[in-house]
């Protein structure tokens, strides 16, 4: 609550129109693309509610695919372009947040610098964006903010600010967890490796693939991983797959087989065995436990 209170104090007197520049829901059709790159005087958060889209910032070689339930955070002032492949549609929700309203003077003020410095120094990685994985509740936060602004019911401004603080904290925690252990420039190779793993988690991944991507030998990569993270490369990959599966079990109605596929496991059996090894229960039993907890909380 200490962080929540501090963040709320930083925006409680800021007008909504200054805090939130723009917002929208958009059903984007297959093959659509922006005519040319553009930028905003705000941080832009785009969540994929359904389907998938591609985006790049600064140059086309930085392009990434964003699919349900991932979201993309684009740094303020960074030229970017969004496009869809011919066989893909996307339903997106977007919000643009004025960083200057939160951190007066770009770095001073009560909003702790750690939140945005994590983005700027580690996660944008010189590309101007970061992809946040597997948390549909981020889109839910943004949806509630938009609904409050549009409906303007009693105390809507205060509600919007509470939801905005919740959104900031959720993004911060997700990003910190996603890039945990990457704390200084000496870990740039680990950053590159982790980025590759997250962006290719649906595909087969080997240490050789990662090493080639970040221009290291496989042996050097494996030594560096163990030294910096305390884990092997493949333990890290499998941990990310399992965590992704856990999140999908909690936040989607996908079948267990589809969850396994969405996590890059070759078979349902592989997923079930690995999940039980890490969490002490099968995926189906875990989902039942979550459903029972939700039922109790709703009473």
Image (tube, rainbow, N blue to C red):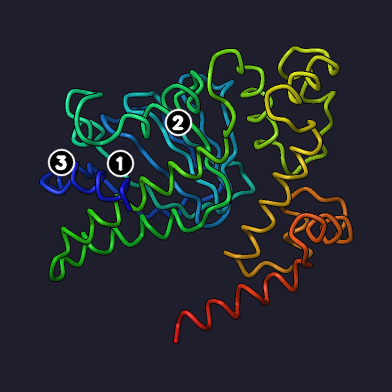
228 or 45: nearer the viewer: 228
Residue drawn at x 65%, y 75% as measured from the top left: 289
Nearest to the eye among marks 1 and 2: give it: 1
At numbered mark 1, what does the secondary structure look like: helix, strand or loop? strand
Tell which circle, 1 or 2, labels the residue nearer the N-terminal end.
2
Tell which circle, 3 or 1, labels the residue nearer the N-terminal end.
3
At numbered mark 3, what does the secondary structure look like: helix, strand or loop? helix
Residue drawn at x 80%, y 14% as measured from the top left: 220
Give the image location of residue 272, x and y in percent: 83, 61
Give the image location of residue 285, x and y in percent: 74, 73
Q: Which residue is mark 1?
A: 96
Tell which circle, 2 or 3, labels the residue nearer the N-terminal end.
3
Which quarter of the figure has residue 209?
top right
In the image, taking residue 27 as reference, residue 283 lies left or right, namely right
Which quarter of the figure has residue 239?
top right
Image quarter of the C terminus: bottom left
Cβ atoms under marks 1 and 2 closer than 8 Å: no
Q: Which residue is mark 2?
A: 81
In the image, taking residue 171 as reference, residue 41 lies left or right, namely left
Give the image location of residue 25, x and y in percent: 37, 55
The image's mark for residue 18 is: 3
At numbered mark 2, what does the secondary structure look like: helix, strand or loop? strand
Cβ atoms under marks 2 and 3 closer than 8 Å: no
Per the model, the C-alpha gap separating discs 2 and 3 is 24 Å
The crowding category of the residue bearing disc 1, from other C-alpha atoms within 10 Å (few below 14, some 14 to 19, many at least 20), is many
């Amino acid at each position: 609550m200490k962080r929540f209170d501090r963040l709320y104090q930083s925006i409680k007197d800021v007008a909504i129109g200054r805090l939130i520049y723009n917002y929208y829901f958009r059903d984007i059709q297959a093959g659509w693309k922006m005519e040319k790159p553009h930028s905003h005087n705000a941080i832009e958060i785009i969540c994929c509610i359904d389907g998938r889209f591609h985006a790049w910032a600064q140059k086309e070689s930085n392009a990434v695919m964003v699919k349900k339930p991932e979201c993309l955070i684009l740094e303020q002032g960074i030229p970017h372009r969004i496009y869809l492949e011919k066989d893909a549609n996307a339903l997106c929700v977007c919000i643009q947040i004025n960083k200057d309203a939160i951190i007066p003077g770009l770095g001073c003020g009560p909003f702790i610098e750690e939140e945005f410095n994590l983005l700027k120094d580690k996660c944008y990685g010189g590309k101007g964006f970061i992809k946040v994985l597997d948390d549909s509740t981020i889109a839910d936060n943004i949806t509630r903010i938009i609904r409050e602004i549009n409906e303007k019911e009693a105390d809507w401004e205060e509600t919007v600010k509470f939801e905005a603080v919740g959104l900031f904290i959720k993004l911060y925690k997700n990003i910190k967890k996603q890039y945990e252990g990457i704390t200084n420039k000496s870990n740039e190779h680990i950053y590159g490796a982790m980025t590759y793993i997250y962006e290719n988690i649906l595909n087969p991944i080997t240490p050789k693939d990662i090493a080639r991507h970040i221009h290291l030998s496989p042996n050097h990569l494996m030594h560096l991983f163990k030294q910096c993270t305390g884990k092997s490369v493949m333990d890290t990959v499998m941990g990310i797959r399992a965590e992704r599966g856990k999140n999908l079990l909690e936040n989607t109605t996908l079948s267990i087989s589809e969850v396994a596929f969405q996590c890059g496991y070759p078979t349902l059996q592989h997923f079930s065995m690995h999940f039980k090894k890490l969490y002490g229960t099968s995926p189906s039993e875990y989902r039942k436990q979550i459903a029972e907890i939700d039922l109790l909380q709703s009473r």
